[in-house]
Every structure is written in structure tokens, then in C-alpha cells.
Image (tube, grey):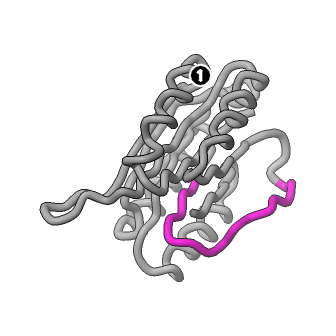
Amino acid sequence: MIKVLGIKIIDRIKEAGLTQVVLSRHSSVITTRLGFHEVTDEVCSREAYIILHLSGDPVDSKKLITELKEILGIEIREMVFAGSNKIPEKEITSGLTEILGILMERSHDVINSVQKLLTAYGCNIRTRLGVNEMFFGEPAGLIILELTGDKKQRDLLEKDLKALEQIRVKKMVF
């Protein structure tokens, strides 16, 4: 099983410190961490996002999630890749920030097909993170995307990715 956790911090000034304490306490289950927020010359957004790639004992991951849920002012979403891809999931489909998770076999053909799609929809990808992974004992690639731009184009990207063989696609929306 592969678990990706998305955290939206509504007010970084108030909640980032508490969130960091919990993340530090449970750092042994965090394989990869990506944090981002909008910054320009005029504005430094108080809203922020953290994407966590979790591994290790599922009991320890559950403790992390339980502690995070106790912090007021953050929202949490989970993306789990396990077993069959046919399991229906409760999915939130409207929001301002969309995160796609792509789990794929590490074969030349699959990698090329995914890369062609990501290049074609490049104007809709704000952030991209790639992680090497093992899934059911086989080498796999996990790609996490923060999407931006036209909603129809984001939906087409997701549809085109799901049409490919040998990959699994999950989504979280804040």
C-alpha cells in the first residue's frame, strides 16, 4: 500500500508551527515532503499546502493522521494506492487546488506514454514531484502533480491518464 497525504494549512502564521511539531514527531513515516504556497513581490499567501508520501507501519501513519486532525485550521485529504484500481472512492470534485497522484509501472513504454501526456498538458501542471517506489514487490514510479488552469483541461488530463494501461490515478481536491 502507498499512501499520500495532502494538508491544506488555512493560516500558516497560526497553524504551521503546530503542524510542524506533529510532522517532526512522526518523521519516521514520512518518506517525502513537499510544501508550497504562493509568493510574489507583493504577496506572501497565508494559505499553504504540504504533500506527504508516507511509508512504514500503517499504525504509525494512522497516529500521524489522528494528531493532524486534532489541529484546527487545517484540512487533510488522503490518496491510497492499494490492491485493485477498481475500488470506488468518495471523491471531492470541486475546489481550488487539485492534486493528482499517478502510480505507474517502471517500463519504458509506460514512462514514455505518461511523459507525453504530461508534456501535452504542461500548462496545467504547476508542481511536479517524482518518487521511486516499490509496489507489490515491483519497481514503480509515483508522480504527484499540483494542477492549475482551465478545469476542462485538468479533467481531460485526468481522463487521458486513466485511459492508459499499467497506471493508477488518484485525486485530492481542496
Q: Position of residue 19 (x, y in %)?
A: 51, 37
The residue sitting at the left extreme is: 41
Q: Assign a secondary structure to mark 1.
A: loop
> Magenta: predominant secondary structure element?
loop
The residue at 44%/80% (across/down) is 150
- Identify the image quadrant of the C terminus: bottom right
Three-letter code for the amino acid on which mark 1 is drawn: His
The residue at 44%/60% (across/down) is 118
- Identify the image quadrant of the N terminus: top right
Q: Describe residue 76's horizontal placement relative to residue 149 as left or right.
A: right
Q: Nearer the viewer, residue 84 or 43?
A: 43
Q: Position of residue 18 (x, y in %)?
A: 50, 35
Q: Is residue 93 located in the magenta-colored stretch of the structure?
A: yes
Q: Position of residue 6 (x, y in %)?
A: 57, 48
Q: Please give the residue where the numbered disc 1 appears in the rendered image.
A: 26
Q: Nearer the viewer, residue 81 or 164?
A: 81
